[in-house]
Image (tube, helix red, strand yellow):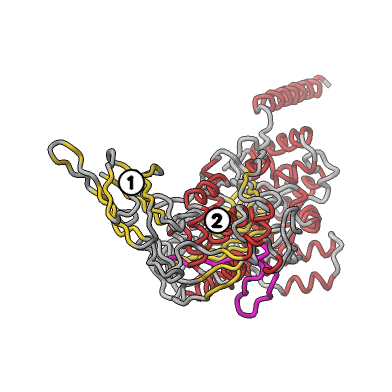
Amino acid sequence: MTALRLIAAVAGTALTGAVFALAWWIVTLGPAPRGEGLAYSAQVVDREGRLLRPYATPEGRWRMRAAVEDVDPRFLRMLIAYEDRRFFSHRGVDPLALMRATYLFVAHGKIVSGGSTLTMQVARLLEPRTERSMLAKLRQMVRAIELDATLSKDEILSLYLGLAPYGGNLEGVRAASFAYFGKEPRRLSLHEAALLVALPQSPEARRPDRAPDMARQARDRVLERIARDADIPADEIALARLEPVPQARRPMPHLAPHAADQAMAAAPSQSVHRLTLDLHLQTNLERLARERAQAMGPDISIAIVAVDHASGEIRARVASADYFDERRAGQVDMTQALRSPGSSLKPFIYGLGFEDGLVHPETLIEDRPLRYGNYAPENFDLTFQGTVTVRKALQLSLNVPVIALLDKVGASRLTARLAQAGAPLVLPKGEVPGLAMGLGGVGITLTDLTMLYSGLARLGTTLPLAERAEAAALARPPRRLLDPPAAWYVGNVLIGTPPPDNAARNRIAFKTGTSYGYRDAWAVGFDGARTIGVWVGRPDNAPVPGLTGRSAAAPMLFDAFARGGDMIAALPAAPKGAIFAAHGKLPLPLQRYRPDRLVGDSTEPALRILYPPNGARIELGETGGKREPVALKITGGVAPLTVLVNGVPLAGRGAERTVFFDPGGPGFVQLTVMDAKGTADSVIVRLQ
């Protein structure tokens, strides 16, 4: 008895010491890691939270967070049935699974089943160990019990879904689903879900892109097991076994790359960047741009912007035809590039004319030769239409009438009004606003031009465009573009513009533009809900013979509306103050608009400033220490003449055709001459 008592005492002491040692070891482990410090892939998502583009972690891994609701419920049932049938009932460690694993090890002399629960696997992923030992396994069990005590089952599953290894640099079910199937895990089919259940057990040996046969065998074992445990019909299992496994990885989503890069640059530490874009519209318009650019040639790029009127949010932005195409300069953002707008600013000139009461859509206007100093505008086809309505002049994009109207409303006023609306025009260095602006002699971005057209759809006010959700949530007061009746007149005219071949009429209000030398082709249009702008050209600003807005950009504009998937929304109703009348019923001043500079409109020669020409630079001279006067030469017109220098008349010059004025010093000077009939000519020169 004494010996037995001694043995029992020694055993008890050893057991007590072992318990205290284990307890002390557990205490020294510290709290269980829960993944707070893990780096996940930054994500750029659309307005609904759908993935546009992920970015690899600093270590080059694709690791995306995934919650239980992000995956197909059937995948979860299969995962639990295959990996951990008692997941929802045990407390992190499954004693029955451990007993089974021990028995199989003794019976077969090798590890047949590991006995690890999903919680233990999460513990290993959160605190990875290279050694495989009983101590390491014990550590996993301790950590699993801690995790189960502090986290819900859904939180543990979410950690597994975000961290499980899938081979190479893929971690988590979302990264694997995109890499192997090009879709979110909530849309997995049966055979796809079975493969993703099987891979984490041996991710490198079963990689489909390197060992497709091993991957297939592992997938089929999962299907065989779940046929018994997951209540899935046998015919579905049989069909799933016939499906091939993917043998290559797909690229990660790469939608809206320019917008995504800019969002990342603006907030590099942010993990999720939400944009106002719509994934489906962005996908469709990127595909449209890529298809059309390939058909047009290897140097052509395309940019498209789609805007929601009510919110001012950008719903799609295609900044180039192909981000990875170096020949097309695909990484250059053409929605922000300054380009010549061609005729696409004409609607705003007419809008100011409507606002000022100079014209109405049914007003008659002359399309006949005019001259402004040395500048004589011509139409694109080098012909003249004679007397036309303003409606027809804008719909046919005639040049002469719009320049006549711009001369009246003022180029500087047009510049100021567009800048007030949020779209500053950029003039060539050293230039001032002039009549050439009406035909595209300025620079503007596609984004700004699209915003201006959305202002027409909003009946005269623009909203600053927003692409990041944070910016869209801020208060953005509207800015004035035109009075409501004037904006409505413009939309009412543009909806009647002849559409491209095979396109429906009277559905989209739109305008095209072609810059000088066939460098830029534009088409911008709107319905009652959305404005879309299209630009086509070469990023290097080289000419493309035959490239016009009508032939290149307008068909793409109509296709963009069609691919939006929504019904065309009606334009807003006419606001208070709009006049509905045929030409003959208009007030007399609105029945006809006649510019002062029509060539051949009088028996008298047209009034012109012969010298100096508009835009000239004149060197100032000195004689005897005194500044020499500058000559002004005039032809045509009906005497007496009035000469103004910067708005101040020169006295006693009524009949002279050559006058001299004191320049007063270097700088810009506006010279204006008016005759007895009120005809005028004006130039701006630089004295230096």
Q: Is mark 1 on a helix, strand or loop?
A: loop
Q: Mark 1 points at which residue?
A: 652
Q: Name the residue under label 2.
A: 449
Q: For the N terminus, give its image quadrant.
A: top right
- In the image, residue 269 sits, relative to residue 655, either above or below, namely above
Whether pointer 1 and pointer 2 mark residues with C-beta atoms closer than 8 Å, the reply is no
Name the one closer to the observer, 490 or 110.
490
**Which residue is found at the position 41% from the left and 54% from the top?**
674
Magenta range: 491-516
Name the one closer to the observer, 287 or 139.
287
Q: Is mark 2 on a helix, strand or loop?
A: helix
**Numbered marks: total:** 2
In three-dimensional space, the C-alpha distance between marks 1 and 2, rounded to whole angstroms, equals 47 Å
- Determine the main secondary structure of the stretch shown in magenta: loop
Relative horizontal placement of residue 583, taking residue 397 as reference (left or right): right
Residue 331 highlighted magenta (yes or no): no
